[in-house]
Image (cartoon, rainbow, N blue to C red):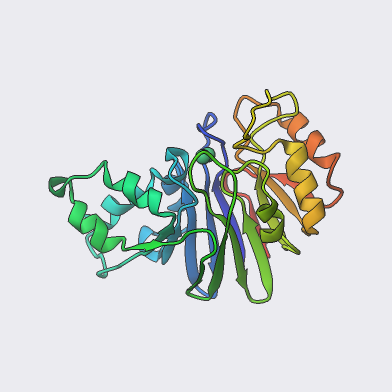
Amino acid sequence: MELTVLGASGTYPKAGGACSGYLVRHEGFTLWMDAGHGTLSTLQTFLPVTEVDAIFLSHAHPDHFVDVYPFFYSLFVHTDRPNQKVPIYGPKMVQERMGRLLTRRDGKDDFDSILPWQTFEPGDVAEVGPLRMTAFESAHSCTNVCLRVEAGGSVLTYTGDTGPHPAIEKAAAGADLFICEASWLEDERSIPEPIHLRAREAGEIATRAGAERLVLTHVWPHNDVTKVREQAAAAYSGPLELADSRMAWSI
Ligand SMILES: [Zn+2]
Ligand SMILES: [Zn+2]
């Protein structure tokens, strides 16, 4: 698999950056994983919109799905659109929220036709092109799928947004690459039911899961990236990087 970062900012984009978005490519198949603000722009520097085969949306927060709208319009008005259908996989709540911004006169029926919906909730498994996707539970303010992708004997795990949850470790077990959210630093205020991870917690989960490589993402743009790296590295001794637009790995 090839993984490319389209955007990695948490909650709002940093200057010149974009929110969550990734390309997973394998054997000519392209999965667009989360479609946060600004990711469609970067995506088109790697491939034309007509080459996206499927979309995965982790949850129903705008920083993970709003670029689906311009993607739809890009296909809708494309001069040589090859009658393309691009299925979207995600929790039911994403479909419900996405639908509210479109009316029939805005192309709602075409949206549903061009981007057919596939409900993909924790516990589900889907074969998507050459990729096997398994949905795990997580702890967020709305249903979020923590995604394990397997292909060609390799494993990629992406948390979406989550606080501490035992399923994350299972999703990342033995992963060749683990993209883990690290929205918070150590001094973030404590709340009874955390909806994000501290960088240290991301490192701890990666260590317990035996992940080969840890990529931190969804870092809040106002956080000190040096501290993010240090706090994660205190709990994880393997290769560690902070995701940023255009970074890429072969897995
Ligand atoms: Zn988010
Ligand atoms: Zn979220």
Tally of numbered tags: 0
Q: Residue 209 or 78: which is nearer the viewer?
A: 209
Please give the name of the residue rendered at 70% of the width and 60% of the height, measured from the top-left corner: 170
Q: Is residue 69 visible?
A: no
Q: Is residue 63 left or right of residue 167?
A: left
Give the residue displayed 75% in from the left and 41% down from the top: 201
**Direction from residue 52 to residue 15 in the image, left or right:** right
In the orientation shown, which residue stands out farthest toward the front? 192
Q: Position of residue 184 (x, y in %)?
A: 67, 31
Horizontally, residue 245 falls left or right of residue 43, namely right
- Can residue 91 be seen in this snapshot? yes
Q: Nearer the viewer, residue 122 or 235?
A: 122
Residue visible at 62% across and 24% down in the picture:
222
Q: Position of residue 164 (x, y in %)?
A: 68, 43
Query: Given the current orientation, which residue lies at the most extreme left position?
Result: 105
Q: Tell me if 195 is positioned left or right of 72 in this view.
A: right
Quadrant hosting residue 158? bottom right
The N terminus - image quarter = bottom right
Residue 93 image point, x, y percent:
39, 49
Q: Residue at x 38, y 43 (%)?
A: 66
Q: Quadrant of the C terminus?
A: bottom right
* 10 in relation to 70, above or below: above
Location of residue 18 with respect to 3 vertically, above or below: above
